[in-house]
Amino acid sequence: MDGLWMIALLLLIPLLLWTSSTFVFYFKKCFYVAWMMLLALFAIPLCILKSGGRDVENMRIIRGLVRHVKYFLGLRFDVSGWEHLQTEGPYVIISNHQSSLDVLGLMEILPDRCTMIAKKELIYAGTVGLVCWLGGIVFINRKKTNDAKNVMADAAKTMLDDQIRLWVFPEGTRNQRGGLLPFKKGAFHLAVQAQVPIIPIVFSSYSNFYLRKEKQFNSGTIRLKILPKIDTKGMTSDDISSLSDKSFNLMRSAFHSISDSVTQSNGPSRH
Ligand SMILES: CCCCCCCCCCCCCCC(=O)SCCNC(=O)CCNC(=O)[C@H](O)C(C)(C)COP(=O)(O)OP(=O)(O)OC[C@H]1O[C@@H](n2cnc3c(N)ncnc32)[C@H](O)[C@@H]1OP(=O)(O)O
Ligand SMILES: CCCCCCCC/C=C\CCCCCCCC(=O)OC[C@@H](O)COP(=O)(O)O
């Protein structure tokens, strides 16, 4: 009889854990970090063999390796506006930033020869940090505006010399409080200095499946809306504020419209 009780308990404990949303939250988060670290470990030799070191072309390998991760986490992406990414030559992509999960959406639609601007601390994220470096990610020190400006001015030149696209998160940090944070100016200076278009991309709110405070990480659909490009030809530094305001207003209204429609199909949320 004791043996039967033991077996019943052994079966019941994992079942209870699995159905506990807090357990699922931590499990998915740990799995995500561990799996990305492991994928990055695979990516390192592949990138070195392909390009011999740091090269934006390595982003093809990284993109290919990351694209299946969404299935493990129960996430789906619903992308609209693909035609707006069919733009020749260099451009700056700007998007909202809610979580490190954004990497999954980013890799879903990442164009060729596109890399990112990221905070310098990311380079210390173990194997992921090394892969970011190998993928040509441009690291900036957010605490030293002048250093960041110089690095971005160099990036504007490299974009043109090497025909590279750059993805910037103009909010400058992750934001899950709903809506968009006021935009920092770096992405707009970058586009104007290089005289390249800006392509805004909006991720719908994650709050219908991912709630950090409430420890919930359910399955869900993320809408990604690629907006028409905004030309910067002929613009100067005097146009930065209006360019930033225009981009912000377009993205904010797209955020609310795609987040509302995703909420209606996935159930209740707050954003
Ligand atoms: C196999 C597994 C592999 C896994 C691999 C995973 C890879 C995925 C990686 C994904 C990476 C995601 C990383 C995301 C991040 O790290 S987000 C954080 C970092 N990014 C940013 O911060 C970008 C946005 N920030 C900016 O653009 C800022 O403007 C910045 C340049 C950092 C300066 O900061 P700050 O001083 O706080 O900003 P302001 O905007 O207020 O600017 C102050 C004044 O400076 C002027 N300015 C700004 N930039 C420039 C410039 N480039 N040139 C000239 N002048 C500039 C700005 O206009 C302000 O002056 P005024 O007030 O207008 O007079
Ligand atoms: C030495 C071990 C260090 C472990 C560090 C964990 C590494 C994370 C591993 C896997 C996650 C994969 C995706 C990583 C890309 C995350 C990019 C990101 O989201 O950075 C946050 C940054 O945009 C803004 O930072 P803040 O919101 O200002 O803060």
Image: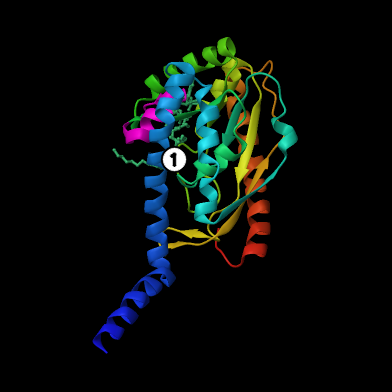
Q: Is residue 138 visible?
A: no
Rendering colour mode: rainbow
Magenta stretch encompasses residue 135: yes
Question: Is the residue 29 above or below the residue 169 in the image?
Answer: below
Question: Is the residue 44 above or below the residue 172 in the image?
Answer: above
Location of the C terminus by quadrant is bottom right
State the residue in front, 225 or 1: 1
Q: Residue furthest right?
A: 83
- At 58% across and 29% down in the image, what residue appears? 241
Question: Is the residue 222 above or below the residue 117 in the image?
Answer: below
Q: Is residue 24 left or right of residue 92?
A: left
State the residue in front, 268 or 29: 29
Total marks in image: 1
Q: Is residue 14 visible?
A: yes
Q: Residue 259 lies in what quarter of the image?
A: bottom right
Crowding at label 1, few (<14), some or many (≥20) Cα neighbours within 10 Å?
some
- At 67% across and 43% down in the image, what residue appears? 225
Location of the N terminus by quadrant is bottom left
Q: Is residue 8 left or right of residue 186?
A: left
Write down the residue under mark 1: 173
Residue 157, image x, y percentages: 53, 12
- At 42% across and 42% down in the image, what residue appears? 36
Q: Residue 52 lies in what quarter of the image?
A: top left
The reply to whether the residue tagged 1 has its Cβ within 8 angstroms of ligand 2 is yes
Residue 119, image x, y percentages: 40, 31
- The boundaries of the magenta stretch are 124-141
Magenta stretch encompasses residue 174: no
Q: Residue furthest left?
A: 2
Residue 129, image x, y percentages: 37, 32
State the residue in front, 15 or 186: 15
The amino acid sitting under disc 1 is Thr
Ligand 2, image quadrant it occupies: top left
